Image: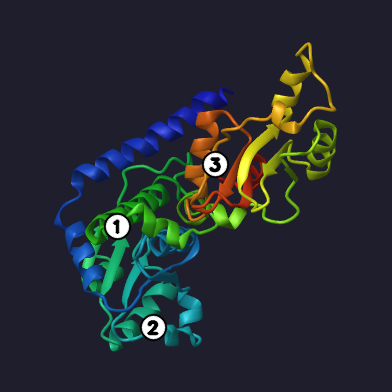
């Protein structure tokens, strides 16, 4: 049995159903967008079985892209959770047949609250279709299931249409990546847009020596600091140099190398610094990669050291 071919046929069949639905789509999507935009409360999504699972995902997508939304199970709604609906909300109800008993039983009660309804089913003549103020057709020609029993193409179309509605609402609202990041502060985009250098830089027990320090003592400070670098400061804590492990390795190749000499003999006297701890960590990473360094010294506007930012700290924090 050729499972590669079977899998390809499933994907092609479902893709074909999406293309057919895309060509059929008309003003109803605009009506759905307008209805949601006029809603002062939340857009509640409901459905039973596979439609319910898809509905929960649609609700999650809506909520994370600027449309206040949550999923409500019809059975739970009939046993007290109808109290989660309020005047000013709207309902997105999903049932491929349009006749799911649990769902249809709750609709008259929803209408009592004067809550507008967006229905998703295969026929506008279904019970759900007749209750709907806006109807989105999810009819398909063929399920991918060889028995034509398990919802496959139909659930894919329902999910995709939910995504389409969410994207339309994002465009309508002018929902930007900054907005998305504010809903996903723990995600990679949220970290890029909100985590600052001050959140990640090290400020305590920094490996620091004076300009009069001998190289051998600076090496000890470097080892104890575990940053692969040692900062050289004057008596006001202003940065005047930096000795990295790379500087040390290059120094070892010199004929007159001596650990008894001053650390200033081998240090970089113009190290890369950053005098803005409020800079985004992602922008600091750009600087680190640009200059091919591991450590960025953070100073104030007077060149006084306030901290250091190591590339390992950025990586561990998931900054990309």
Is 211 situated left or right of 71 in this image?
Answer: right
| CB-based contact (under 8 Å), mark 2 and mark 3 | no
In-front residue for pair 91/211:
211
Residue that carries the numbered disc 3 in the rendered image = 273
| Callout 3 crowding tier (Cα within 10 Å): few <14, some 14–19, many ≥20 | some
Among the 4 quarters of the image, the one containing residue 113: bottom left
Q: Secondary structure at mark 1?
A: helix
Name the residue furthest left.
27
Q: Please name the residue that numbered disc 2 is placed on.
A: 85
Which residue occupies 29% across, 57% down? 170
Q: Is residue 68 left or right of residue 79?
A: left
Q: Earlier in the sequence, mark 1 or mark 2?
A: 2
Q: Could you tell me residue 63's position as x and y percent?
A: 41, 65
Q: Which mark is residue 170?
A: 1
Q: With respect to residue 203, does 265 lie above or below?
A: above
Q: Give the total of numbered labels.
A: 3
- Give the quadrant of residue 74: bottom left
């Amino acid at each position: 049995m050729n499972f590669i071919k079977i899998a390809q046929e499933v994907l092609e069949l479902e893709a074909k159903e999406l293309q057919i639905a895309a060509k059929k789509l008309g003003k109803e999507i605009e009506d759905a967008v307008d209805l949601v935009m006029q809603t002062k409360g939340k857009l509640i999504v409901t459905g039973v079985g596979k439609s319910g699972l898809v509905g929960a995902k649609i609700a999650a997508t809506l909520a994370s892209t600027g449309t206040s939304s949550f999923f409500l199970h019809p059975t739970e709604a009939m046993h007290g959770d109808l109290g989660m609906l309020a005047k000013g909300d709207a309902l997105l109800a999903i049932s491929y047949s349009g006749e799911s008993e649990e769902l249809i039983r709750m609709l008259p009660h929803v209408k009592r609250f004067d809550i507008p309804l967006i229905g998703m089913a295969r026929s506008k003549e279904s019970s759900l279709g007749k209750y709907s103020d806006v109807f989105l057709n999810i009819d398909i020609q063929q399920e991918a299931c060889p028995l034509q029993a398990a919802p496959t193409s139909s659930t894919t179309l329902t999910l995709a249409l939910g995504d389409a509605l969410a994207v339309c609402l994002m465009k309508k609202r002018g929902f930007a990546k900054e907005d998305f990041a504010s809903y996903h502060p723990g995600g990679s985009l949220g970290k890029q847009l909100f985590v600052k250098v001050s959140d990640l830089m090290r400020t305590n027990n920094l490996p620091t020596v004076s300009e009069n320090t001998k190289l051998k003592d600076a090496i000890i400070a470097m080892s104890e600091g575990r940053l692969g670098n040692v900062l050289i400061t004057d008596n006001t804590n202003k940065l005047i140099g930096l000795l990295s492990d790379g500087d040390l390795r290059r120094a070892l190749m010199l004929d007159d190398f001596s650990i008894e000499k001053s650390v200033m003999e081998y240090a970089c006297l113009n190290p890369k610094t950053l005098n803005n701890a409020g800079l985004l960590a992602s922008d600091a990473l750009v600087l680190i990669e640009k200059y091919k360094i591991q450590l960025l010294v953070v100073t104030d506007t007077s060149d006084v050291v306030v901290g250091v930012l190591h590339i390992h700290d950025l990586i561990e924090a998931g900054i990309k």
